[in-house]
Image (cartoon, grey):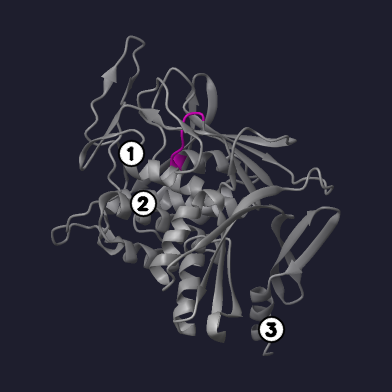
Amino acid sequence: MKLYLECNMGAAGDMLMAALYELLPAPEAFLRKMNSLGLPGVEVKAEKSVKCGIAGTHMRVTVRGEEEVPGGARPHTHTHGHTHTHEHTHTHHTHTPDPPNAGGMGYAELLRLIEKLPLPARVVADARAVYGLLAEAESEVHGVEIEHIHFHEIGSLDALADIVGVCLLVDMLGAESITASPVHVGSGFVRCAHGLLPVPAPATALLLKGAPIYGGTVKGELCTPTGAALLRRFAGSFGDMPPMKTLKIGYGMGTKDFDRCNCVRAFSAEPGGGDAGDAPRDEITELRCNLDDMTGEEIGFAAEALLGAGALDVFLTPVYMKKSRPATLFTALCRTEEEDKFTRLIFRHTTTLGVRAETMRRAVLSRREASRETALGSVRAKLSEGWGVKREKTEYEDLARLARGDGAS
């Protein structure tokens, strides 16, 4: 399935989750899964919402019965009688030590919580990667080490539900290609723990670096850091809607009221029919460096760090350098708009003094995942098509699981 995300009123985690939720053929299964994860005190509900006469869904996430609301914002009542807020306060993080029993969670603790969730490995990896993007952005913006970033409990659990929910929905929809529109970020200022910050908030601006964004006359924060991190993780490209035969449209409603419909729209379409004109293409960057003074274990750790941060691929090639010294050619593939991020990670985790970069176009097969029933149980299969070919490959881990369960090795 191909997805197009229209972000004409920005993006937030709950809006993206609601828009994708509306694309599901059986959405109740998603709610049952989310509410059975065991997130402490968290409940996720889908509520009908109408904005500017358009019906959609608002995802209401409560923690111990309370919904996170914009703190510090003063409601304004207009002549049409609706009361709403124009400011949003970030409560997702702080960089000062919390007092004892403050109820906050550190970055490492959040990752451990994600690892324990009863979710497919791909969903867990995506959720970890999104939090990695958020933590790296906050680290750079505020000049603190990632391990010192602290997340307040209500804000972190609310954001965690949004992030896990979107990652799970992408998996359930079998989305193999996601494109997003240019992102409307809003204008003015946003109030947070550090005071008044310009819109887009610094972390949001950093996360959307390289992506097309724009402001305008709408006052307030339209794209949140969580929304920006999710777009950065899943949107393979940004631009106008490509030619597509739409199957379904989802409306994810925000909480604020404006003079225009405050929503994210998600469009779903089947992948291309298989000829070269319909087959997906995108642009990637290849980063390379030669390493002759690192151990195999150190190089392996660096490769895992980049893959964990969302690199498309990392591979190692034995080479010979000057004076016939054996070395390793370290190669990482990433989305072009993330070149700076992965260049920085290569410098952080290797001993190289220089990183070479080459941007290239690639043709890819449309990919999706399906479930197959066998005499021994259910297995996942990877289906790909395009350029006149169709392929199917059973997931190795599922085959290994069935083999171990059947007494084989």
Disc 2, SS: helix
Q: Residue at x 68, y 75 (%)?
A: 396
Q: Residues within 10 Å of mark 3 (few under 14, many from 20)?
A: few
Residue 203 left/right relative to 293: left
Residue 319 visible (yes or no): yes
Picture quadrant where residue 241 is located: top right
Discs 3, 2 touching: Cβ within 8 Å: no
Give the residues drawn in magenta, as a range: 8-14
Task: Identify residue for label 1.
Answer: 201
Q: Residues within 10 Å of mark 2 (few under 14, many from 20)?
A: many
Residue 230 counted in the magenta span: no
Please state the horizontal and vertical placement of residue 293, each as a whole percent of the image: 44, 82
Residue 315 left/right relative to 43: right
Disc 1, SS: loop
For marks 3 and 2 on the same chain, the one whose residue lies earlier in the sequence: 2
Task: Identify residue for label 2.
Answer: 137
Task: Identify residue for label 3.
Answer: 403
Please state the horizontal and vertical placement of residue 196, each as a whole percent of the image: 23, 34
Observer-nearest of 314 and 328 = 328
From the image, give the main secondary structure of the stretch colored magenta. Answer: loop
Q: Amino acid at mark 2?
A: Ala
Give the vertical position of 179 relative to 218 (above or below).
Answer: below
